Amino acid sequence: MKPVLVSIAALMTLVVPAHAAFNSAYTDLDLDQCLVLEADDFGASWSCPGYRGYPLLVSEGDLRFSLRYGFNIDKEPRGQTLGPFNRLGERLEWRLSNASGRWLPIATIVRYHTADPETGQDSGQVLVVTQLVEGNSCHIAYVDARANRDANELARAAADAAGDFDCASDEVEIIGEFTAW
């Protein structure tokens, strides 16, 4: 009987990953390639291509951008932005996990260029890590891209820990040195 148990245990390790592996995929954030959903003098919103058809909604209002994700975007809380006036970077990094046996997005990392409140000129760069969990997608970490030499690695580590963050009660983590605003 022991050989049978050992064989079943060996088979289980092949079916269930011992731990999740992570990888990145990238999509462009080119609003000219997105569908304009609405626009007026106060802002605009666009539907943009995400990772393998994963829905992405970009909104701008009061010179601040926000992103919302998912197949039930209408059930997600409003998108989050940063305090200072800002604009989005040109690429979106999707962090993928194979914990379920296939590569699925669990978080994103996007570079926000923030403006100096006095001059309105670009002065900061913040990597914003957003957790992608249906009904619980939100910013989970900020990394100052100029103050930290290893900013991308710090942001990826935060993204890979996504999933347990409670958007209603947890505070966004500031990782590393931070002087962006």
Image (spheres, grey):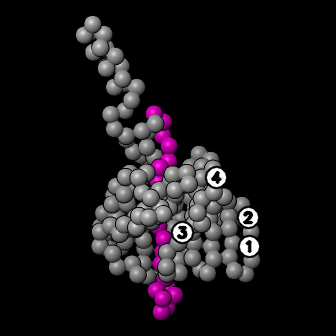
The amino acid sitting under disc 3 is Gln
Q: Position of residue 63 (x, y in %)?
A: 59, 80
Q: For the residues carrying marks 2 and 4, which lies nearer the camera in this image?
A: 4
Residue under circle 1?
39
Give me the C-alpha separation between circle 1 and circle 3: 19 Å
Mark 4 burial class by Cα count in 10 Å: few <14, some 14-19, many 20+: few
Residue under circle 2?
37
- In this picture, is 181 found above or below 111? below
Q: Say which label, 1 or 3, has the lower sequence index.
A: 1
Q: Which mark is residue 49?
A: none
Q: Which of the 4 quarters of the picture holds residue 34?
A: bottom right
Q: Which type of secondary structure does the marked residue at label 1 adopt? A: strand
Give me the C-alpha separation between circle 1 and circle 2: 7 Å
Q: For the residues carrying marks 2 and 3, which lies nearer the camera in this image?
A: 3
Q: Say which label, 2 or 4, has the lower sequence index.
A: 2
The magenta stretch spans which residues? 101-121
Q: Which mark is residue 72?
A: 4
Mark 3 burial class by Cα count in 10 Å: few <14, some 14-19, many 20+: some
Residue under circle 3?
80
Q: Is residue 29 visible?
A: yes
Q: Position of residue 21 (x, y in %)?
A: 37, 41
